[in-house]
Amino acid sequence: MDEKNIDRRRLGRSQAIIWILGVSVAVGSIGITGCDDLLTVDPDPHFVDATQNPPLLQETMVGTKVDMDYAYDVWVYQSNQLGGGIVAVGNLRFALSQRNVNEGGGQAGGLTGGERDSRGPEVAYYAYLQQSIASAERARERILSGEFEGLDANSAEYARLSLYRGFEIVWLSDLYCELVLDARPPRYSSLEGYQIALEHFQAAASASSAEEEIRLAALAGLARVNRLLGNDAQAATFAEQVPDDFEFVSTYSTNTFEQTNRIWFRTWGFGEHSVSSAFRDLTVDDTGIPDPRTLLVKNPVPPRGEFDDVYAAVKMPSGSDPVVITNGTEMRYIIAEASLASDPDRTVEIINEIRAERGVDIVWQPAGTGPNEIRDKLIDEKQRTLLFEAEVLLGDKRLYLRKYNLDLFHTEIPQGFPVGDITCQVLPRREIDNIEGLS
């Protein structure tokens, strides 16, 4: 696929958002209409402008969902480079994997709160995330201002928007050491970002008209951020309210290139990136049996680089595959971690329950090799099971460093260059230069 010839028009947005806005034309007597009125041109109903012709409720809600979907797959692909789940096979797009400070930040398409103008191969995780965060907030503000009759902070729509913004801020906080929101000061730390996300999840979960899917996803969000903030008992309380079979996903399609799942595209479709060596040739315990959760296909397309082969995840074989944002499996791992000190037998039980559900029919039991045996097994099991789903690899590794002083970050890349020691990225220089009040 020739990247230069890819259609990047915004008309290719996911689910093909069709702006069909009716135009109400006042019919009056020309004889009583002033010249100024005759020269007034109604806004084009097929073009959405923030001031002249804002999108109606349905278009607004679809647009914010698309913004979230478009941010998530790109973010998963990029955060896995810093987190060690994905590597480049050549000399292009491996900077995050090298773990050095980079003030560039992937700015293609816009700054905080700005519009991104394409979804081509060089889409920028930072710009997409900030676009999705901003669009959710603009829509929430329109609801609270009374623009949509009958909607308020208890409406299903407000709950959904709050959920979107909550997860989007979590993703930004996972990847950045510090962040800004809505194109204005102050700077927030990652932990402060998680706290802000928690408030959005609370708003979604408490809205009286929230849809059940949104309420459950908000409870899952509350469980995740409480854990990241060190509140294990509270995290488990929320996690226990989420059914084991629950899933909340972002969606994609192969109708156009813009709509295609970028995790699939980078590995299966384009061959410029690969699942990293940390997830290759994994077996169940020490049995030599391949682990069905991390099965890979070698070189589904020729590698676009000379440093490594391409390995693609069997669990994501199509560009239209959805990507799980959170699920009941993540929740059970949260409960298992919260049980480590008080009920380690429960932790082992959850490990084996999930193994059985994911095709591993061998029961694991601790051998008594040390005080951290169950903890370390839980960490390994979670990474294998949740590879490219309920994406927590980077956030987890940063948490393990804070919580257990356990450094699981990679120290080598296929390119052979020295690897640095950062665990999160700095605020992009263009943000600092363009937002008044940031130094």
Image (tube, rainbow, N blue to C red):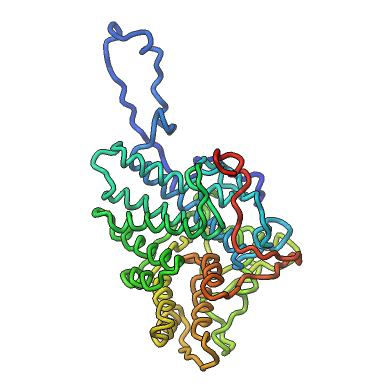
**Tally of marks:** 0
Whole-percent x, y for residue 194 in the image: 45, 59
What quarter of the picture does the C terminus occupy?
Answer: top right
Q: Quadrant of residue 350?
A: bottom left
In this rendering, the answer to whether 172 lies above or below 23 is: below
Q: Quadrant of residue 435?
A: top right
Report the residue at 42% width, 43% height from top. Answer: 17
In this rendering, the answer to whether 153 lies above or below 78 is: above
Q: Quadrant of residue 140?
A: top left
Choose between 161 and 34: the one closer to the eye.
161
Choose between 69 and 240: the one closer to the eye.
240
Q: Residue furthest top?
A: 31
Whole-percent x, y for residue 156 in the image: 29, 51
Report whether 228 appears left or right of 297.
left
Whole-percent x, y for residue 108 in the image: 61, 44
Report the residue at 43% width, 83% height from top. Answer: 341
Report whether 64 appears left or right of 415.
left
Report whether 387 appears left or right of 19.
right
Whole-percent x, y for residue 145 in the image: 31, 38
In this rendering, the answer to whether 8 lies above or below 290 is: above
Report the residue at 55% width, 65% height from top. Answer: 394
Q: Residue furthest bottom?
A: 367
Report the residue at 59% width, 88% height from top. Answer: 288
